């Protein structure tokens, strides 16, 4: 599969669909933002563990819901990308045993 002309090493049982390719593009955007922010904040996401990640997930989900209802699409998409990354941080914290309230 390719995104913006760059091969992505994902294997599917069948030929990737348009949805697969579009989703890969969103995930790559999220990873790019994760890299930029993590470069800036130096793994700060690890400090609060799963509790902090869950707090941010809830906060971002509420913002996405609110902004979608108000048709503020650009902000909603940006916050949705953040939401993806907070979910990644939650999973990484959990797998590393950084469980917290």
Image (tube, rainbow, N blue to C red):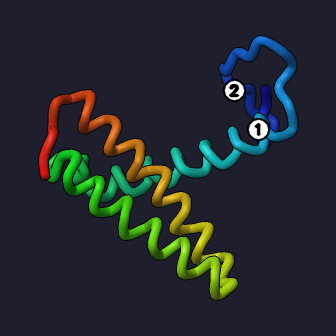
Q: Earlier in the sequence, mark 1 or mark 2?
A: 1
Secondary structure beneath dot 1 equals strand
Q: Which residue is mark 2?
A: 8
Q: Residue furthest bottom?
A: 70
Front residue of 19/1: it is 19
Q: Is residue 72 above or below residue 93?
A: below
Secondary structure beneath dot 2 equals loop
x 70%, y 15%: residue: 11
In the rendered picture of this protein, how many numbered marks are placed on residues?
A: 2
Side (left or right) of 44 relative to 54: left
Q: Residue furthest top?
A: 13
x 60%, y 43%: residue: 27
Front residue of 53/1: it is 53
Q: Which labelled disc corresponds to residue 3?
A: 1
Side (left or right) of 3 relative to 46: right
Q: Is residue 57 above or below residue 66?
A: above
- Mark 1 and 2 residues: CB-CB less than 8 Å, in contact? yes
Structural distance between the alpha carbons of marks 1 and 2: 7 Å
């Amino acid at each position: 599969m390719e995104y913006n002309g760059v091969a992505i090493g994902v294997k599917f049982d069948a030929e990737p669909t348009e949805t697969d390719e579009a989703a890969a593009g969103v995930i790559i955007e999220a990873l790019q933002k994760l890299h930029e922010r993590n470069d800036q904040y130096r793994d700060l996401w690890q400090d609060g563990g799963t509790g902090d990640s869950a707090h941010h997930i809830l906060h971002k989900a509420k913002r996405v819901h609110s902004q979608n209802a108000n048709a503020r699409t650009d902000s909603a998409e940006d916050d949705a990308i953040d939401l993806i990354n907070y979910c990644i941080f939650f999973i990484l914290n959990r797998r590393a045993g950084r469980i917290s309230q």
